[in-house]
Image: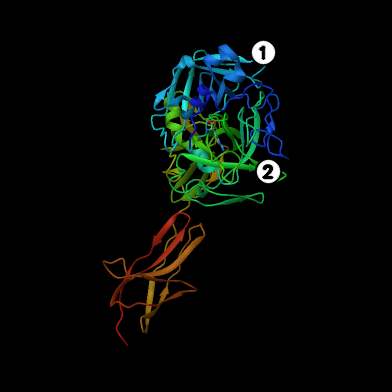
Amino acid sequence: MAVSALIVALTGLALPTSAGAATAGQPGSTPRVINGDLSTAGQFPYLVALLSANRYASEGAFEAQFCGGTLTTPTTVVTAAHCVVDKGAVAGPRTILIGIGRDLSAQSLRVVEVAAVTANPAYNDDSAANDVAVLTLAAPVTDVPSLLPISPAEAASGLSAGTALQVAGWGNMSTTGKDFPAVFRVGNLVLFPDSTCGGGASYTYNGVKFDGFDVGDADPATMLCAAGVGGAGQRIDSCQGDSGGPVVATVAGAARLIGIVSWGEECASRFPGVYTRVSAEYDFLVANGAIVALAPSQPPTITVASEASALKVTFVPASDGSSPTAFAATALDPVTGQVFNCSTASSVTAAPASCSIAGLTNGTAYQVTAIAGGALGNSPATAPVIASPVPLATAGTISRVVNLGRGVARFFVTATADNGAPLTALRVVCQVPGRNAGTRSADITGESATVTGLRAKRYRCYVQAINAAGVSNGQAIAVKLKRR
Ligand code: ARG
């Protein structure tokens, strides 16, 4: 389960003994993250090393490193709770230093002090649920790019099994011994299905079969499972010392922190690695300043549907890292210059937000634009969408009923006018008065419809015509079917 790397750091159990101590990896496999690659300059600028302040003073950064972390704002590092919590006690801020730089043995390694350590109160030491903590820095780091944690909305639309991920850290490169790098390593992973992360399902990736974690062992509500397979079929995984470090995905073109190295079953075993599901920790991260609020920088995506004297606009927020609180749409009549509006609160979880711009003239071509708005400002407007409200159809009426017996009747109808918006349905509907059950209907072809299954004695029947503007019901008539 969740090996506390802090304990490891204090006892020195899993720490490297010297920078050059190359413990042999498995025969035939190059030691890495486990089977990862050497990072290149400029990669993962937001990856930081958590250093034990005591050991840093006596032995230097390489020996002092015990976990990874991610700079998510100039003043916050997001890491794993198990890196900073020992038997329910949170490490004091002065016991930890933040190392910034690729090479822990380099003189140029920058070291920053920590002002506060906040572990998620919902972190569970036994299950490793909510394995996340925020370190608040004593001074802002403004010259290093930070990485934005993924929002629940982005995760819902942008993450699925098979999504390419990367993990980075200074963790063990050997599955059999200890081999810690001075320069951090990068592993290419894929996101595993949730069913492998507490549903017991296995998963085969690149021809390599992985076992899944059973119910009770992992929980997909707060955890992600991921692993990689290299070109020669070797399993790629994070390992001891990588904990707290980032798992990164590109979502809608932008890099996001989606996971935090949390735990595993050995390293690069038959099981995937388990990572804190960052989107599930969003509220905790916002509450602790680890997510900068952003004004929406991109307009929402809209669809416009014609209604009677109205246009219904449906909004999908852009994946720009912002959290819009509302959407607004405008319909401009380019001839008269008249402007009409509607607005709605945004919804993260429920169906896409929509609103109807009312009071419009049927048949007029309006230019519809929309914006997303948040506490910090509004997005630019969408490009205009041209749309016209359409009138409801004028449904015809039933002119004659021929009882064919055995519950079958033929209805002759007068013409229905579509009023310019093509019909999507035209039918005769017969309802049992005062009841929803027993409603029967049949499409009108030519000038009649044959309705079957009319088992009740009395019906009210009418012509129903549907177009983009909605449903138009014609005058209903009473139909009494004598048995014959
Ligand atoms: N708990 C470990 C740490 O403290 C991370 C283990 C990750 N294991 C894995 N197989 N992915 O560094």
Image quadrant assignment for residue 19: top right
Q: CA distance from mark 2 to mark 1?
A: 34 Å
First along the sequence among labels 2 and 1:
1
- Viewer-side residue, 460 vs 44: 44
Image mark for residue 107: 1
Residue 337 x, y percent position in the rendering: 51, 35
The image shows residue 244 at horizontal and vertical percentages of 53, 29
The residue that label 2 is drawn on is 234
Q: x, y (%) of residue 110?
A: 61, 14
Above or below, 261 relative to 305: above
Compared to residue 171, the image places residue 317 above or below, namely below
Asked which secondary structure carries label 2, the reply is loop
Instruction: Work out whether residue 442 or residue 118 is closer to the camera in this orientation and state it.
Output: 118
- Where, by quadrant of the figure, is residue 261 drawn? top right
- Image vertical order of residue 229 relative to residue 131, above or below: below
Q: Residue flagged by tag 1: what amino acid is it?
A: Gln
Question: Residue 182 lies in what quarter of the image?
Answer: top right
Query: Residue 36: x and y, percent?
Result: 67, 35
